[in-house]
Image: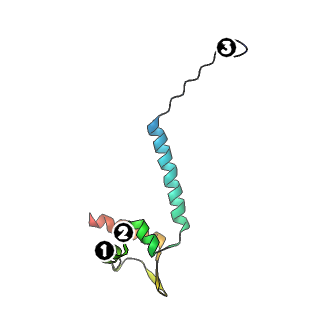
């Protein structure tokens, strides 16, 4: 009860599905932003992005003629945008 003698009641309902959708949208926006900030990946990032070991990368798509890669010294580098596009297409073709 307030000083004026008026009782205030507030009822809040939360739609869990709506909250989940909003959270997923924000996460996706953040991931896209992070992806656009990376110009290239190294082998560790490629392994992380594909959830594959280096031997698996080598035996599946690494030697594909269209897979974008550059060797500088002893290290391999992969243009992030092109590698991501290739990997999505390659994955669809495997299905």
Residue 10 - label: none
- The secondary structure type at the circle numbered 3 is loop
- The secondary structure type at the circle numbered 1 is helix
On the rendered image, what quadrant is the N terminus found in?
top right
Between the C-alphas of marks 1 and 2, the distance is 10 Å
Between the C-alphas of marks 2 and 3, the distance is 64 Å
The earlier-in-sequence mark between 2 and 3 is 3
Q: Residue at horizontal 44%, vertical 75%? A: 43
The earlier-in-sequence mark between 3 and 1 is 3
Residue 60 - label: 1
Category of crowding for the residue at label 1, using alpha-carbon neighbours closer than 10 angstroms: few (below 14), some (14–19), many (at least 20) = few
Along the line of sight, the residue nearer the viewer: 14 or 33:
14
Q: Residue at horizontal 50%, vertical 52%? A: 27
- The secondary structure type at the circle numbered 2 is loop
Reading the image, the residue beneath label 2 is 52
Tag 2 and tag 3, C-beta contact below 8 Å? no
Tell me which corner region of the image, top left, top right, bottom left or bottom right, holds residue 33.
bottom right
């Amino acid at each position: 009860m307030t000083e004026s003698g008026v009782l205030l009641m507030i009822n809040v309902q939360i739609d869990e599905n709506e909250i989940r959708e909003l959270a997923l949208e924000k996460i996706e926006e953040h991931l896209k932003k992070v992806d656009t900030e990376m110009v290239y990946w190294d082998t560790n990032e490629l392994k992380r992005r594909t959830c594959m070991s280096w031997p698996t990368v080598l035996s599946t798509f690494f030697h594909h003629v269209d897979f974008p890669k550059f060797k500088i010294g002893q290290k391999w580098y992969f243009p992030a945008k092109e590698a991501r596009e290739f990997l999505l297409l390659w994955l669809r073709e495997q299905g």
